Amino acid sequence: MACFRTRPAGWFSIILFISLFTLFCHPAGSVKHKDFKTCEQSGFCTRNRRLADSVTAQGDPYLSPYHIDPRTLKVTNGQLEAIVTKTTLTKETFTFPLLISFLDSGVARVTLNEDKRQRGQIDLRHGSTARKERYNGAAAWALTGDGLKTNANIKVATDEQGFSKVAYGPDNRYEATIRHNPFGIEFRKDGQKRVKLNDRGFLNMEHWRPKIEKPQVEGQDAQAPLTSLEEDEGTWWDETFNGNTDSKPRGPESMAMDITLFGYEHVYGLAEHASPLSLKQTRGGEGSYDQPYRMFNSDVFEYDLDSPMTLYGSIPFMQAHQKGCTTGIFWLNGAETWVDVTKSKSTANSLTMGLGGHVDTQTHWMSESGLLDVFVMMASEPADLSRLYGELTGYSQLPQSFAIGYHQSRWNYVSDEDVKDVDRKFDKHDIPYDVIWLDLEWTNGKRWFQWDEHSFPDPISMNKQLDESHRKLVILTDPHIKSEGGYNIDDELKSQNLAVKNKNGNDYDGWCWPGSSHWIDSFSPAARTWWKSLFPYDKFKGTMSNVWLWNDMNEPSVFGGPDMTMPRDNLHHDKWEHRDLHNIYGLTFHNATYHALLERKKGEILRPFVLTRSFYAGSQRLGAMWTGDNLAEWSHLQASIPMTLNQGVSGFPFAGADVGGFFGNPSKELQTRWYQAGAFYPFFRAHAHIDTRRREPYLLGEPYTPIMAQAIKLRYQLLPAWYTAFHEASVDGSPIVRAQYYVHPSDEKGFAVDDQFYVGSTGLLVKPVTAEGSTNVDIYLAPDGENYYDYFDYTIHAGVGKTVQIDAPLEKIPLLMQGGHIIPRKDRPRRSSGLMKWDPYTLIVVLGKDGKAKGSLYVDDGETFDFQQGAFIHRQFVFEPEDGLRSVDLAARKGPKTADYLKVMKDVRVERIIVVNAPGSWEGQQSVRVVEEGAKSGSTNAPLSWHAGGDGKAAWAVIRDPRVGIGRDWRIVFS
Ligand code: NOJ
């Protein structure tokens, strides 16, 4: 058992070792709740919830103590500035500069800073050298700078009643009404009220104040009740949790605000939580949680399901959707954040003129420190919102094509011979895979960049064997560096001053896999430059161009630390406290590795592959994520679906869960069903804890191994459709797998459905089996006027806004094709995706009820950035009854490399076209006419065979080898 190979010395260390042993090396169990704060254990969460309660208790009219001084209002270049003043119960006033930016896109950004802290006019306690301002660096990490252009044509009118109205956005269809006293902003689009900030008066900017030492009077109860003018200071100046005390040198500095979303019953997003896709209420109401959704990146292994508890990553972006409109709130803050969600139903009355009731969702956002920086986005459909959010934070990385194949991982493959053996066995059992993974144990005692020479004496020969079948190796590297004199990496980290510091300014020392460790401060440009210098192949021996990286434990995870992470009063580059940017740390490390991999060898520019466990808004630009340490249980398989869907809604769609479950040993049935579901995760990787039994798919035997192999082969068959979906995500932010509400935004019955999903815009609808012993599933079909066809045998299911039952014996994945789509495939599964590169395509044309169908295909070299210079093929396939099937160029963006790429691809052709729901008029027809751009002969013929359906199945036809190029215009005429 290799959970901990190195042991700290001394009694403290022995106790620590025993507690860590029980933490990590016990059979599958459940999360250690006591290690993670609840709202009641978090000072600022409690304070803000209390404020909300007291405001609610006061009822109407409650006057929030914040107002705009109208004399300070200024409008320049699409931005409105003013000073917001807060008056306390003791009549003191504090000022907060307000900046509202109205962006060209129609997005509004509201930023509130704190005058005193901004000017540095505060004193820090305990001799702290931390920065005095509210943290303003989140934007630099999360935003790309695109989409931030302000709209100089806004129209502003301020009236006598103390309201400023701003018309903005495309065609000035957006309106913000800023109420001066009390301060609040209401947003409308096309006259419809959508959002209100500080609607319920929960805005709270905790201003800086000096600590006033109150002498303890003998005999007086320290817990004496507060007078109405006093505030509870209990957690202002320091806070202890699990034996760790946070020194809080800047005192209380939280900020919070309520945001009401009018008419929205469903809100989504706020990754990462193991909760249903449509977020639940957190303060009362049927089945609600009693805790707010928490965002504080933490190593919460064996996490609870159906819980608002924090997990490894945070994306403070929420989508609210109702029929006809979608609204987004992006709360740009890197500190710990809690969000309460409540819903209130208003019933029809005479004032609503008999127009039925509706539900409003009320949210309350609370962050420990930093600026109030919130983006309000109003759109018509979820897809518009994904685009707007992507314009701000960047779109998902277009990965190398191997990354969307199947990944085989476990903790651990124990030697280079073991890896070679697994590689050979996949071939022997005819199971494709693209990547094999090495967890911690590839290292020499958890020293990154050093191989364990006994177990991995010859990594290059291992990499070369993998390379023969175009396969890759991914190895793990974490942000903690073993603290050990003589370990060159640690020596450099320390001597170059690149580690995270403790509150006293010394290198922070904590505990992780290697024992005593330091953490790279990846906020520091110098640290990132140094990190880059470690990866060139001649320096990082044993690596070559098919070796990629996995960044784990980057929350950062610190064993025995508060909330399993580092102290909040630790210091980073530029003296920012850890509390300010905790949720961004994981992104910065992921970013450092991404950039390091770009510069391993001069002239070799391959798209980096880096998997991260921790993430923040913007991480989607850098690679993939997975949902961490789940359990080999059916409930975790179920939960993985809403979690993966929510990653898409939250703008980071390259996501998946450990297939098979990390902790514990799955039954053969569970593992098989998990492969069938995993074949439809954007990130498809099997992974397992070191204590689990080996479970490579070829080990399970009949009937399981062939069924899992089929699932993997299905993934490979559909790789062209997957890659096209990844491309879409990389240009418009759309999720790679899409929830029912996203694809059918007008069908209210589908708004809470989160156990089935679509692959990109292919019309492929999958409903994984997630219950033990099930041999059928209920699948909900939208009333979209289309039929849905079984992927494997073309059985017809009518889409009518109801649930249909589909047989799903163990060997079957419930997979349907929505009428009206064209799906690109490759039907010659090989050992890896790289070996399929030049294979011909099959097109599945699923005719809709109107006899039409459409679909697209994106192809590029799958490795380099040449696509940015036009080296890609982007085609739309259109079938219309009169015209037949056409391939149309969608590549609006040609570039210097377009022509060469088309030349390289000139022999890659379509080898088969299958038409599902083929018209009966084709019966007896022997051939079709093929007209191709540039062909010498005017047209050629290709054989057609038509097959009657019957017995509930659709008729279908096959056109064999039409010999049309994938990169050319062509047309197939059927009459
Ligand atoms: C925690 C990760 O979540 C898990 O996937 C990995 O196997 C272990 N760390 C060991 O590196």
Image (cartoon, grey):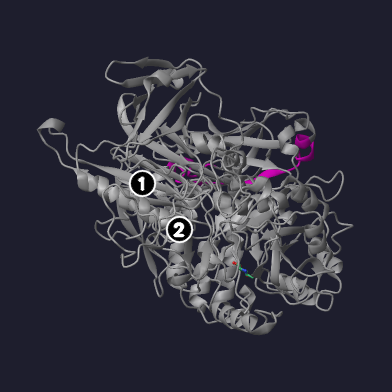
Chain part drawn in magenta: 901-925
Magenta span includes 107: no
Q: Residue furthest left?
A: 350
The reply to whether residue 250 is in sight is yes
Name the residue: 53% across, 73% down. Answer: 671
Of 645 and 259, which appears nearest the observer? 259
- The image quarter in which residue 567 lies: bottom right
Name which residue type carries label 1: His
Kindly report which numbered mark, 2 or 1, lies closer to the viewer in this rendering.
1
- Pointer 2: residues within 10 angstroms few (<14), some, or many (20+)? many
Query: Which of the 4 image quadrants contains residue 731?
Result: top right
Q: Amino acid at mark 2?
A: His
Please tell me in which quarter of the rendered image ligand 1 is found.
bottom right
Disc number for residue 640: none
Q: List the residue tagged with mark 1.
A: 364
Query: Looking at the image, is 756 positioned above or below residue 880?
Result: below
Residue ranking furthest to the front: 218
Which residue is pictured at 75% across the width and 49% down the height?
528
Q: Position of residue 653 (x, y in %)?
A: 54, 49
Q: Which residue is mark 2?
A: 273
Q: For the point 13% across and 31% down, which residue is it? A: 351
The image shows residue 809, relative to residue 202, as above or below, that is below
Q: Residue furthest right?
A: 538
Q: Is residue 907 magenta?
A: yes
Mark 1 nearby-residue class (10 Å; few <14, some 14–19, many ≥20)? many
Where does the image place residue 400, in percent across and percent down from the top left? 70, 49
Label 2, secondary structure: give it. loop
Q: As rendered, which of 890 and 482 lies closer to the eye?
A: 482
